[in-house]
Image: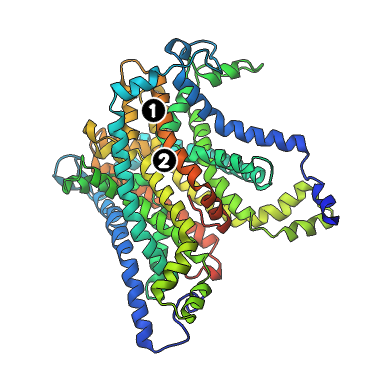
């Protein structure tokens, strides 16, 4: 093939390219690697100087302590409940809202889209005081539902904004064609739009879930009871112990990272689809 | 995209039909609008009003003080100091995130063995909870047992011994934030890179442009818009970032050196229970945010086809 020769002429030499790739890999992965090996080290090895890059002996001490001597599973369960409730509300409202914004003409549509974009930019800190006072007023302090509701304040505008981009990337002509072929609106939606929008919807739900999963600020001010704490503030408590147990904290880190990792692997192909469409704002 | 072209009203019909369509549209968007109004817009508006009151965070009473909170804020050297620290943090971490993000996107834009895997790894720092990211870095940089100070001490140049101390903790904060948030830049830039027509590069190559010239004359102009929006968003979000500086600094004596404006705001509201003062400080951040957004949209008005955005 005449084209091949030209493509072979690499813009960056092979060795340089791989040095850069490995550099990127090391920068991203080393802290995570260190978290994992630290969680398996024995106490004395954890504090050894110089540090060992590969543990001499692997121990489950930190995990045993995490599972049996802390409220880790309670925190875990609370976090899942709050994140799931947030994602459910945000996604139902967001999908139909974004569909409407891209498929129906009505007065105020532009305004709604602009306010959504502005709200998407609002950082949680500027809503901290009012949401705290309102939650107190409504008796939603120390309540997982209250926490989930405050997460709507920053995850819904975000989800609306991404979903709108995804729906925009689906040509409206496809629906026209289905309607002309005799499908009704609901059928066009089910058989034409949804399959195409699904990657975007899945990616958005994962990102919404993770936004809630990762929150620290609102959980910090709204949750005081230990049995209602989420992972972020529960793990933060490990720091207040008399002696900071780094092995325990790293083990908690590994356990919290695993669900994110599973999600991530599961949605990777959707993510790449999202990148292709340019719709990912996360 | 004009309003008519992207809506589903089939060949011009009677206006009742169109009105029904509009009603369905409004009905579908109503839940979102109600939720955003109730949970985002109303709190922000309520906050503006709260800023005029002296209010204890836990007690029900409040006293109207007019612009008193703002007078006090602008006379407080601690406010100016925290604003300065937030600026240093935002500028430093945003600039480096953009550099790292663009570099990462250029690396991942090529196809090579394991490129999907590396894409996943590169996104991962953004996915792990902030609390974990900060604690891992506190451990990596630990004064006594940290692995990075240990590795750096092998270098032939003088390096600080205690990274988490007053003089250097801002550096740790910036580096850790770059690690956590640069994937956001990477994803957005990579998505844009994938839509640059290859013909542009072919043309540049035919003209004999070097790799460097191709980057500056083809790639960078194409990335301009996405980089501007990323700069706006990341700048806003880094300036207003609370959890990273708080989690890195608290419990250590050096927390003072990274007490940025959001941390200062949190302390006013929940350490000193001055909710009115906290609200006023949040409003200062809101005003700065609106200013940045306004400047952005005046300087770079959205393109015609985004009109319905």
Residue receiving disc 1: A252
> What percent of the width, then of the height, locates residue B296?
51, 57
Q: Nearer the viewer, residue A36 or A269?
A: A269
Describe residue B124's horizontal placement relative to residue A62 as left or right: right
Which chain does the numbered disc 1 sit on? A
Q: Say which of marks 1 and 2 sits in front.
A: 1
Classify mark 2: helix, strand or loop.
loop
Q: Relative to B235, say whether A278 is above or below.
A: below
Where does residue B37 sit, x and y in percent of width and height?
A: 30, 60
> Can you say whether B171 is above or below B100 in the image?
above
Q: Residue under circle 2? A: B241
Q: CA distance from mark 1 to mark 2?
A: 23 Å
- Please provide percent x and percent y for residue A93: 34, 60
- Chain letter of disc 2? B
| Neighbour tally class for label 2: few under 14, some 14-19, many 20 plus, Cα within 10 Å | many
Q: Is any atom of residue B281 visible in this view?
A: no
Quadrant location of residue B257?
top left
In the figure, is residue B181 to the left or right of A7? left
Are there few (<14), some (14-19), or many (20+) residues within 10 Å of tag 1?
many
Find residue B135 and report its horizontal and vertical position in percent: 43, 27
The answer to whether residue B239 is seen in the rendering is yes
Mark number, residue A67: none
| Residue A280 placement, left or right of A26 | left
Report helix, strand or loop for mark 1. Answer: helix
Same-subunit check for callouts 1 and 2: no
Q: As displayed, is residue B304 above or below residue A134? A: below
At 51% from the left edge and 66% from the top edge, which residue is drawn?
A170
């Amino acid at each position: 093939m005449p084209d091949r020769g030209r493509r072979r002429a690499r813009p960056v030499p092979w060795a340089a390219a791989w040095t850069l790739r490995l550099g990127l890999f090391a920068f991203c992965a080393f802290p995570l690697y260190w978290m994992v090996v630290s969680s398996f080290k024995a106490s004395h090895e954890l504090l050894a100087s110089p540090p060992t890059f590969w543990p001499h002996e692997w121990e489950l001490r930190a995990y045993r302590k995490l599972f049996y001597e802390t409220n880790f599973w309670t925190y875990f369960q609370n976090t899942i409940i709050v994140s799931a409730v947030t994602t459910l509300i945000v996604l139902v409202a967001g999908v139909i809202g974004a569909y409407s914004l891209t498929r129906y003409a009505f007065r105020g549509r532009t305004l709604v889209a602009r306010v959504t974009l502005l709200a998407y930019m609002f950082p949680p800190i500027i809503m901290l005081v009012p949401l705290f006072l309102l939650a107190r007023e409504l008796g939603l302090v120390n309540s997982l539902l209250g926490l989930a509701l405050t997460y709507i304040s920053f995850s819904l505008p975000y989800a609306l904004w991404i979903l709108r981009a995804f729906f925009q990337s689906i040509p409206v002509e496809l629906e026209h064609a289905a309607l002309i072929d005799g499908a009704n609106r609901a059928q066009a939606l089910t058989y034409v739009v949804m399959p195409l929008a699904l990657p975007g919807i899945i990616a958005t739900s994962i990102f919404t879930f993770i936004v809630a999963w990762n929150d620290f600020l609102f959980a910090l001010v709204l949750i005081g009871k230990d049995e209602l704490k989420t992972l972020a503030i529960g793990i933060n408590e490990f720091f207040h112990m008399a002696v900071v147990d780094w092995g325990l904290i790293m083990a908690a880190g590994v356990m919290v990272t695993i669900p994110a990792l599973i999600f991530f692997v599961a949605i990777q192909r959707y993510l790449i689809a999202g990148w292709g469409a340019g719709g990912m704002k996360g | 995209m004009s309003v008519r072209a992207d809506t589903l009203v089939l060949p011009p019909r009677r206006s009742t039909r169109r009105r029904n369509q509009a009603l369905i549209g409004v009905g579908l968007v109503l839940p979102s609008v109600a939720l955003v109004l109730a949970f985002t817009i109303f709190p922000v508006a309520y906050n503006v009003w709260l800023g005029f009151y002296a209010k204890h965070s836990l007690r029900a009473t409040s006293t109207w003080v007019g612009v008193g909170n703002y007078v006090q804020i602008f006379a407080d050297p601690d406010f100016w100091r925290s604003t300065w620290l937030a600026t240093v943090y935002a500028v430093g971490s945003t600039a480096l995130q953009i550099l790292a993000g663009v570099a990462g996107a250029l690396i991942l834009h090529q196809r090579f063995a394991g490129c999907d895997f590396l894409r996943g790894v590169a996104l991962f720092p953004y996915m792990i909870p902030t609390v974990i990211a900060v604690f891992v870095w506190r451990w990596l940089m630990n004064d006594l047992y940290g692995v990075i100070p240990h590795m750096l001490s092998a270098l032939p140049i003088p390096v600080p011994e205690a990274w988490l101390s007053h003089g250097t903790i801002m550096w740790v904060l910036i580096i850790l934030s770059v690690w956590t948030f640069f994937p956001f830049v990477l994803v957005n830039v990579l998505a844009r890179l994938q839509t640059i027509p290859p013909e542009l590069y072919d043309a540049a190559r035919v003209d004999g442009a070097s790799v460097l010239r191709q980057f500056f004359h083809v790639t960078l102009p194409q990335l301009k818009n996405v980089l501007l929006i990323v700069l706006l968003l990341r700048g806003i979000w880094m300036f207003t970032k609370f959890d990273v500086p708080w989690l890195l600094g608290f419990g250590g004596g050096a927390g003072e050196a990274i007490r940025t404006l959001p941390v200062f705001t949190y302390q006013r509201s929940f350490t000193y229970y001055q909710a009115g003062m906290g609200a006023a400080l949040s409003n200062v951040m809101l005003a700065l945010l609106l200013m940045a957004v306004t400047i952005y949209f005046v300087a770079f008005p959205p393109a015609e086809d985004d009109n319905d955005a």
